[in-house]
Image (cartoon, grey):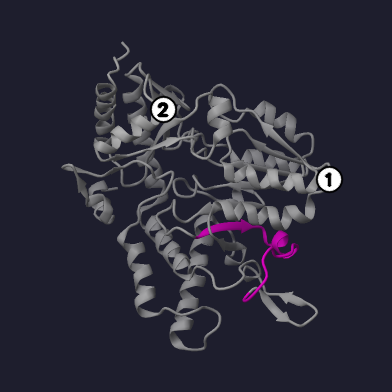
């Protein structure tokens, strides 16, 4: 990977402020967009803007083909078997909610258990909280161990009790921990559970194969993988999707409509009511093609190198606390390019603000994982930097310099 050449594909990275170029270290929140994605969306609006599945004229058929092709690209990327298994929605959050409002609404009953972990994003907590209240079901949590990984002994014990559904994050957006999705899915299936995996932080960064994992549902977002916002993906096994009712009704998701009843369209359109985010699908397809060209394995290696370098720089400073797997415990399969940290004596909001004065973009707060940050880690907030294919070691060095500026501005001493 030629990082400088890759950076040229992202126009925002060429912007300057206070004489410094933008060091964008918040890709876990949303990624920047390459020209290929921007141009694909612009091309649609300029040259063949039309609704899909409705028109027998040229630009409508071209739009339909481009939209369907994007699903084929997504299916190939995660080895879904067919684009029939790829449902588009707004984001990971809506994808998980869609699974809750369709399969879970039909299959979860009073007294049934749903099992998730204590490292989940709110998107994989709140939909299940709402569901168990409606259904008078039970929501259980798997502990996070002292090394900031899912406690597999606790998981084995709780999954053996026979939950109806198991749902967990593939990669933690706070800790960067990579869970063994295949093993966890196999254990859940062995105890009769259906499995949903939140892949928002995995698909953009590591090779994902849903057939190999074996999960029943898999959710992720376009905007975290170089694509546009407002479109996400719910993968579902075909036999499951065929057997459940849609959550939304209206145009395009029907085969026939009468005054008394309706019948549903084939997959995946059965779950996509109304005019979809056409430009979003086309932009997502362009993002998948871009990632394929660069190579997800190359991206993964680059991020591992950056993460190892950043962890070592942080660990040289006794006044910085890192939350997550440290460099000595880091292996290729257990750590992603997300580093949450705090500077002793500095609130993370102040850290982020002072970093911004150096044109370094990081995130601060609970990162939509309040139970994890507040109860498990035990702090009110953390600062977080996250890497992607366009970041480089020089930006880590700028972070280290910015740490010293935080101390200078807030008049903090450095811990020896």
Q: Which residue is mark 1?
A: 110
Tell me the quarter of the picture where residue 370 sits: top right
Query: Badge 1: how crowded within 10 Å, few (<14), some, or many (20+)?
Result: few
Q: What kind of element bears circle 2?
A: strand
Q: Quadrant of the C terminus?
A: top left
Q: Given the current orientation, which residue lies at the most extreme left position?
A: 19
Residue annotated with mark 2: 341
Residue closer to the observer: 93 or 311: 93
Check the image and report above or below for 17 versus 348: below
Labels 2 and 1: the sequence-earlier one: 1
Q: Quick one: which residue is furthest to the right in this view?
A: 110
User: Residue 84, position in %: x, y?
Assistant: 61, 67
Question: How far apart are the two marked residues, 2 and 1, measured between alpha carbons?
Answer: 41 Å
> Could you tell whether 35 is left or right of 292 in the image?
left
Location of residue 36 with respect to 354 vertically, above or below: below
Which residue is farthest top?
Answer: 416
> Where 288 sits versus 141, above or below?
below
What residue lies at 47% left-to-right and 89% top-to-bottom?
Answer: 57
Q: Residue at x 58, y 26 (%)?
A: 375
């Amino acid at each position: 990977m030629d990082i400088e050449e890759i950076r040229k594909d992202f126009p925002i990275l060429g912007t300057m402020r206070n004489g410094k170029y933008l060091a964008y270290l918040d890709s876990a929140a949303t990624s920047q967009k390459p020209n290929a994605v921007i141009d694909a969306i612009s091309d649609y609006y300029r040259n063949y803007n039309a609704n899909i599945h409705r028109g027998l004229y040229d630009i409508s058929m071209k739009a339909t083909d481009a939209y369907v092709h994007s699903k084929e690209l997504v299916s190939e990327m995660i080895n879904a078997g067919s684009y029939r298994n790829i449902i588009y929605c707004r984001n990971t959050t809506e994808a998980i909610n869609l699974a809750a409002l369709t399969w879970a609404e039909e299959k979860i009953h009073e007294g049934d258990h749903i099992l998730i972990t204590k490292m989940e994003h709110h998107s994989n907590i709140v939909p299940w909280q709402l569901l168990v209240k409606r259904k008078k079901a039970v929501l259980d949590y798997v502990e996070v161990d002292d090394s900031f990984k899912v406690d597999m002994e606790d998981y084995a014990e709780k999954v053996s009790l026979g939950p109806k559904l198991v749902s967990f994050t593939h990669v933690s957006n706070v800790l960067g921990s990579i869970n063994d999705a295949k093993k966890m899915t196999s254990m859940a299936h062995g105890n009769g559970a259906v499995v949903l995996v939140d892949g928002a932080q995995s698909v953009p960064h590591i090779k994902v194969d849903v057939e190999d994992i074996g999960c029943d549902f898999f959710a992720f977002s376009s905007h975290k993988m170089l694509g546009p916002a407002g479109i996400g993906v719910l993968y579902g096994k075909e036999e499951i999707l065929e057997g459940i009712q849609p959550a939304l009704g209206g145009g395009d998701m029907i085969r026939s409509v009468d005054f008394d009843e309706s019948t549903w369209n084939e997959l995946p359109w059965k779950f996509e009511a109304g005019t979809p985010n056409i430009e979003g699908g086309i932009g997502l397809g362009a993002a998948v093609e871009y990632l394929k060209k660069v190579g997800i394995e190359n991206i993964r290696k680059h991020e591992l190198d950056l993460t190892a370098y950043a962890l070592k720089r942080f660990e040289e400073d006794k006044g910085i606390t890192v939350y997550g797997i440290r460099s000595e415990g880091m292996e290729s399969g257990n750590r992603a390019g997300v580093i949450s940290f705090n500077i002793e004596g500095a609130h993370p909001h102040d850290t982020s603000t002072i970093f911004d004065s150096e044109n370094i973009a990081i995130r601060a707060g609970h990162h939509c994982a309040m139970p994890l940050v507040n109860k498990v880690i035990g702090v009110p907030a953390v600062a977080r930097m996250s890497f992607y294919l366009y970041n480089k070691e020089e930006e880590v060095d700028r972070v280290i310099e910015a740490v010293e500026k935080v101390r200078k501005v807030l008049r903090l001493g450095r811990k020896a």
